[in-house]
Amino acid sequence: MTRRVWMMLAAAALTVVPAAARAQNDACMGIIAPPAFAANCDVAVDVLRAAYAQTGILAAGGNPVPGVESTRGITLMLVPGTTASLRFSAARQLLPDLRSESAGDERSEVATAIRLGTATKVFGGVAAGPVSGVGAIDLLLDAALLPAAGQGRDAAAAFGAGARIGLIRETFATPGVAVTAMYRHVGRQQYGRLCPIPDVSCEDSNVGEASFALNDVSGRLTVGKRLGPVGVLGGVGIDRFSTTGGLVRFYGGGIEGTARLGEEVDRHDTRWSAFGNLSYGLLVGSLVAEAGYMGGGEASLVFDGDAGHYQAGKGTPFGSLALRITL
C-alpha cells in the first residue's frame, strides 16, 4: 500500500513539474515529441512575443495630437476648445514567417490603421514671467481601427484616453513644449491561419497562429514651432506594452496543439521611439505628416543569432498623414 502511494505521488510530480516550467518560462516548454511539434509552437509563440508591441505602436503612433500645439484656419464653432484629427497611420511589422515552407524566416508587412482623436482644453495654464501656458491641461481621446492585413487575419479596434500638460506655450520667440501620458487598449487580433489538418489543399496554410489583445501606457515629450503656415515638431516617446492570456495554435508531424499564455505569464515590452511632424496650415485647419522609429524588442528565444532568420532586435518605422481641424 505504501509503495503504491509513493508511485502515485511520483507520477503526480512528473505531471506537475513540466506545467510549472511552462508557466515560469514559456508555453512550449515540456514539449518533446515530435520535434516539429515543439519547433512550431516556438515559432507561434515568438510571433506573439514580437507582434503585440509592433501592433501597439501602430495604434499609438508618435505625437498624440498631430502637428504643433496650435492649429491654423477657421473655427467651426461646434465644440468650444476642442480640436479633432483624422489620421491614416502605417507601420512596418517584422515578424517570424508562419508559412510552412519558411517557418522562422523573417516576413515584413506594412500594417495600417485609421485613427480619430480629439483634444479638449481643460485649463489654459498660468504665466511665469515671460513664459505663459505653464500647466495647461488638455483631455485627449483616441479611437482607431486596425484592418486585417498581411499575417494579421482579424481587424481590431483600439481606444485610448489621456492628458497633455503644457510646459511652455508657443509664442513668437519660444517653441511650444508639452508632455503627454495616455492609456490605450487594442482588441484581440489573430496572426496567421492554422488550416484543418485533413485539408491539405488549404491555401496560405501556416504552421501556427497567434492571437492576443494588448494594453499600452505611453509618455511623450514634444517641442514644436510654427514658421508662418509651416509647423515643425520633434519628440521622443516611451511605451510599455503588455499582453496576457495570449493563445497560440500549431501543428507538426500530423498533430495539432494549443498553448495558452495564462494570466501568470504577463508579457511586458518597454520601447523608446523618436518622431517628427511637419504641418501646413489650411483654411480649415492643418495637414500633418509624421515619420518615426521605435526601437527593437527583447531577443528572440528561437531565432536570434541564426543567420538568415528573424531578428527581434530590429526596430519599427512608422508614419502617418493627418487632417486636424478646430471644432
Image (cartoon, rainbow, N blue to C red):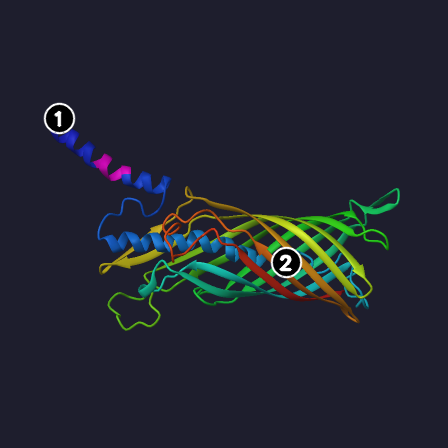
x, y percentage for residue 36?
26, 55
Give the residues in magenta.
12-17
- Upstream in sequence: badge 2 or badge 1: 1
Which numbered tag is attached to residue 2? 1
Location of the N terminus by quadrant is top left
Q: Amino acid at mark 1?
A: Thr
Say which residue appears at 51% left-offset and 51% top-offset: 296
Mark 1 neighbour density, 10 Å: few (under 14) some (14–19) many (20 or more): few
Residue at numbered disc 2: 142
Residue at disc 2, secondary structure: strand
Residue 96 falls in image quadrant:
bottom left
Question: Is residue 300 found inside the magenta-colored segment of the image?
Answer: no
Q: Amino acid at mark 2?
A: Asp
- Horizontal side of 138 relative to 88 (left or right) equals right
Residue drawn at x 23%, y 37% is 14
Q: Is residue 13 magenta?
A: yes
Characterize the magenta stretch by its predominant secondary structure. Answer: helix
- Say which mark, if any, is on residue 310: none
Where is 192 relative to 274, above or below? below
Total labels: the figure holds 2
Q: Quadrant of residue 293?
A: bottom right
Quadrant in which the C terminus appears: bottom right
| Camera-nearest label, 2 or 1 | 2
